[in-house]
């Protein structure tokens, strides 16, 4: 449950700043999704498999460095780690913008991902806020990711039409610079470590409980699968829009905008249902089925109407799950392990990004759209079975 008491002045300023920081950072990373598969074909060494690997490359370094950088933030402070991570995002974006081969682009993506600051940022949010306000703060910051995803799908094609893929990476570098300004000039003075922050250090030996306890494992698996589906789908959807439906890349942004707006009522209904049910399994399974059904419809589209319908279903399921899953982690995890749990959650998310790019690209290279759909369907069946078996909410209160 969200606390009814309002934030105090420091909490309000901190949460607004951290949500803005998340939005700026993720907006730049998400903007490449709707156009990477189309524009990267112009680079030397490009094929479906290599494009998928380059698209998901940043997820590999993100997943590998989330927990180490979270630990480093315990030792030297949150802000230095966040500033270093944003600097790497800017550097990686500039490398990617200047790349003339797919290998150079992949190196830039790896550098972008090495600024893995999600766990340090969430730990800083815990340090700024009282324990009873943490779930609300996490929900606001999590919502900023959904907002950035929606904006990115519209802004990315617009920027690419103006200056190609390099222009998108240049704007990402600028957004990283704006994030640096937020940390340096907007966030309040770093507070002394809160009880939640101390617990994040003291309870590291309880890593097994944070990994598998109280139903958390299936939530980590779900965010992994969700972002795997996202990245795998976007190795093919831009090409479907261009080649199968005949929609000019300059007009992709308008289709994303219309379908995102069409998805909002469905997202609102599903998220509201989360607060009305104690057992999340049925709701999770409905959102998973909507997400995958939308992807299958979009990938098989030969008309604009079917493509639009598929994207609406996909955006309903994906956006609802992207909002629901972090909230469930904050509920399932014991209070003293929430910081650690969010770090693991972020690692699983970005590992899914890398796996989705690699798996989707190779499936598309070997079996075309049919092979990609087969892989996604097999994954979905395993995912649904695991949710039903392991997704029941804990019965013991924190």
Image (tube, rainbow, N blue to C red):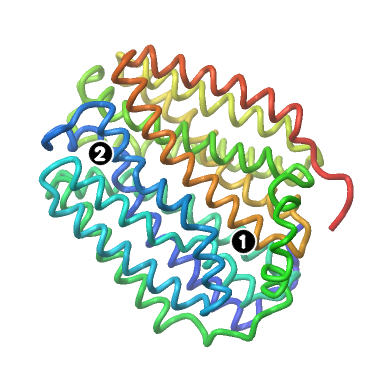
Near mark 2 (Cα within 10 A), the count class, few <14, some 14-19 or many ≥20, is many
First along the sequence among labels 2 and 1: 2
User: Where the C terminus falls, by quadrant?
Assistant: bottom right
| In the image, residue 236 above or below residue 134 | above
User: How far across and down, in percent of the image, does residue 173 sit?
Assistant: 25, 63
**Residue at figure coordinates x 48%, y 73% from the top left:** 17
Q: Is residue 17 left or right of residue 382?
A: left
| In the image, residue 64 above or below residue 388 | below
The residue that label 2 is drawn on is 36
Q: Mark on residue 217?
A: none
**Residue at figure coordinates x 43%, y 41% from the top left:** 353
Q: Element type at marker 1?
A: helix
Near mark 1 (Cα within 10 A), the count class, few <14, some 14-19 or many ≥20, is many
Q: Are marks 2 and 1 in contact (CB under 8 Å)?
A: no
233 and 382: which one is in front?
382
| In the image, residue 236 above or below residue 327 | above
User: How far across and down, in percent of the image, does residue 100 sit?
Assistant: 10, 45
Q: Element type at marker 2?
A: helix
Q: Nearer the viewer, mark 2 or mark 1?
A: 2
**Residue at figure coordinates x 64%, y 38% from the top left:** 270
Q: Is residue 111 left or right of residue 47?
A: right
Q: Is residue 317 left or right of residue 243?
A: right
**Residue at figure coordinates x 57%, y 35% from the top left:** 266
User: How far across and down, in percent of the image, does residue 220 sit?
Assistant: 62, 43
The residue that label 1 is drawn on is 138
Q: Is residue 181 left or right of residue 190?
A: left
């Amino acid at each position: 449950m969200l606390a009814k008491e309002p934030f105090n002045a420091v909490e309000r300023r901190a949460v607004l700043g951290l949500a803005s920081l998340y939005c700026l950072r993720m907006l730049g990373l998400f903007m490449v999704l709707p156009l990477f598969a189309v524009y990267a074909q112009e680079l030397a060494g490009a094929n479906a498999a290599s494009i998928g690997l380059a698209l998901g490359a940043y997820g590999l370094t993100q997943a590998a460095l989330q927990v180490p950088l979270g630990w480093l933030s315990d030792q030297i402070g949150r802000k230095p780690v966040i500033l270093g991570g944003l600097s790497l995002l800017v550097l990686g974006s500039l490398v990617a913008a200047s790349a003339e081969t797919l290998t150079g682009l992949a190196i830039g993506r790896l550098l972008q991902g090495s600024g893995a600051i999600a766990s340090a940022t969430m730990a800083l949010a815990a340090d700024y806020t009282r324990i009873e306000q943490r779930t609300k703060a996490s929900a606001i910051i999590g919502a900023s990711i959904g907002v950035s995803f929606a904006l990115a799908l519209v802004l990315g094609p617009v920027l690419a039409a103006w200056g190609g893929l390099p222009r998108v990476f240049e704007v990402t570098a600028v957004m990283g610079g704006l994030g640096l300004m937020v940390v340096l000039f907007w966030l309040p003075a770093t507070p002394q470590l809160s009880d939640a922050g101390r617990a994040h250090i003291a309870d590291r030996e309880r890593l097994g409980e944070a990994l598998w306890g109280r139903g958390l494992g299936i939530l980590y698996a779900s965010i992994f699968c969700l972002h795997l589906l996202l990245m795998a789908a976007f190795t093919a959807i831009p090409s479907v829009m261009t080649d199968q439906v005949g929609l000019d890349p300059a007009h992709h942004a308008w289709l994303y905008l219309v379908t995102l707006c069409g998805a909002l009522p469905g997202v609102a209904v599903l998220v509201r249902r989360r607060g009305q049910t104690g057992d999340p399994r049925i709701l999770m399974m409905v959102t998973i089925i909507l997400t995958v059904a939308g992807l299958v419809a979009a990938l098989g589209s030969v008309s604009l109407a079917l493509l639009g319908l598929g994207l609406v279903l996909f955006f309903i399921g994906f956006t609802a799950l992207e909002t629901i899953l972090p909230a469930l982690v904050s509920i399932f995890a014991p209070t003293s392990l929430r910081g650690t749990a969010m770090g693991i959650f972020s690692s699983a998310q970005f590992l899914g990004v890398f796996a989705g790019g690699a798996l989707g690209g190779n499936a598309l290279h070997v079996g075309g759209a049919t092979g990609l759909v087969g892989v996604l369907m097999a994954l979905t069946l395993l995912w649904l079975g695991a949710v039903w078996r392991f997704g029941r909410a804990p019965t013991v209160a924190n």
